[in-house]
Amino acid sequence: MNSTLAPAPDLDYAVFVRRVLKRTGIDLRSYKRKQMERRLRSLALRYGASTLAEFYAKLDADPSVLEEFRKRVTINVSELLRNPDKFDELGKKIIPRLPSRAPLKVWSAGCSYGAEAYSVAILACESSRSGDRTRILATDVDEEMLARGREGLFSESDMKNVSPARRRRFFTPENGCYRIRPETKQMISFQHHDLLRDKFPSDLHLILCRNVVIYFTEEAKQRLFREFFESLQPGGVLFIGSTERILDANEIGFEHLSPFFYLKPLADGRE
Ligand SMILES: C[S@@+](CC[C@H](N)C(=O)[O-])C[C@H]1O[C@@H](n2cnc3c(N)ncnc32)[C@H](O)[C@@H]1O
């Protein structure tokens, strides 16, 4: 293969994508191509590769290059209570409207190192339901991030939206960081899950999928939003990122509750 990264001929990118899928299971076809090529290009140059072929040879041969590649494909930026006003709305308006008799079933999809899942755990504990009646599934494709999530240790910068009262109640200080308390940690189960390949969980009351689909093609996004709809119980809510919108929400069956919150209505038309 004689391709160069710039300009990147279509076929060569497609061949690279196919090889990556076969070698790693990562399906780049569903990620926005321009963005992805830009990221691949700067990463390849960092490893002294000026063509996709050279870059593929390097990541095939060297596990550390492959690991770095995985990280670049999956951007892991997160923090606790990211977009605090939206989490405020989640705690005050959305969680109280979810069914209170059955245990609350929540999914944080694309959870990175767990900040989002722990944020919901905090809000659930503060609501009238007790922590042990809430089950949070936190999933991601990045094993390293899942391991960090299970650890439950957060830096000061992760904590910038966490009030002193919440710090005292939910965390223990540890060498300049903050460790989530065991009773909150046990509400969450971290599991590997690829949104583009794996079967979705079902019967959920609340799904958070924030700042994940921004990297996906329109087609992949539409497929995901439909699958999220199917995964929710009637009366359940999907919470998406603050730069995101579901263009065909009504068509899917969602009711737009407020920016970034989408309801799957009850079968009888009640909210
Ligand atoms: C920017 S982080 C968002 C973290 C968190 N949801 C938030 O908003 O703070 C994006 C996460 O999506 C994950 N991700 C990317 N592609 C994915 C896929 N196909 N399936 C599951 N997770 C994926 C990445 O590994 C990364 O941890």
Image (cartoon, grey):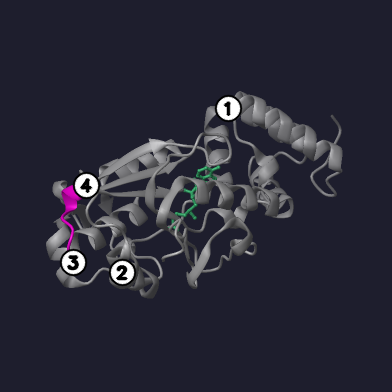
What is the x, y in percent for residue 107? Answer: 38, 48
Q: 177 above or below 71?
A: below
Secondary element type, mark 2: loop
Q: Residue at x 66, y 31 (%)?
A: 20
Q: Nearer the viewer, residue 226 or 72?
A: 226
Residue bearing the label numbered 4: 185
Q: Residue at x 35, y 43 (%)?
A: 137
Q: Nearer the viewer, residue 30 or 162?
A: 30
Q: Amino acid at mark 2?
A: Lys
On residue 160, the disc is 2
| Left or right relative to 235: residue 51 | right
Q: Considering only order in the chain, which callout, 2 or 1, is on the residue closer to the N terminus?
A: 1
On residue 62, the disc is 1
Q: Considering only order in the chain, which callout, 2 or 4, is on the residue closer to the N terminus?
A: 2
| Left or right relative to 129: residue 14 | right
Q: Considering only order in the chain, which callout, 3 or 1, is on the residue closer to the N terminus?
A: 1
Q: Is mark 3 within 8 Å of ligand 1?
A: no
| Left or right relative to 171: residue 243 | right
Q: Considering only order in the chain, which callout, 1 or 4, is on the residue closer to the N terminus?
A: 1
What residue range appears in magenta? 127-133
Q: CA distance from mark 2 to mark 3?
A: 12 Å
The 10 Å Cα crowd at callout 2, few under 14, some 14 to 19, many 20 or more, is few
Residue bearing the label numbered 3: 166
Q: Is residue 111 visible?
A: no
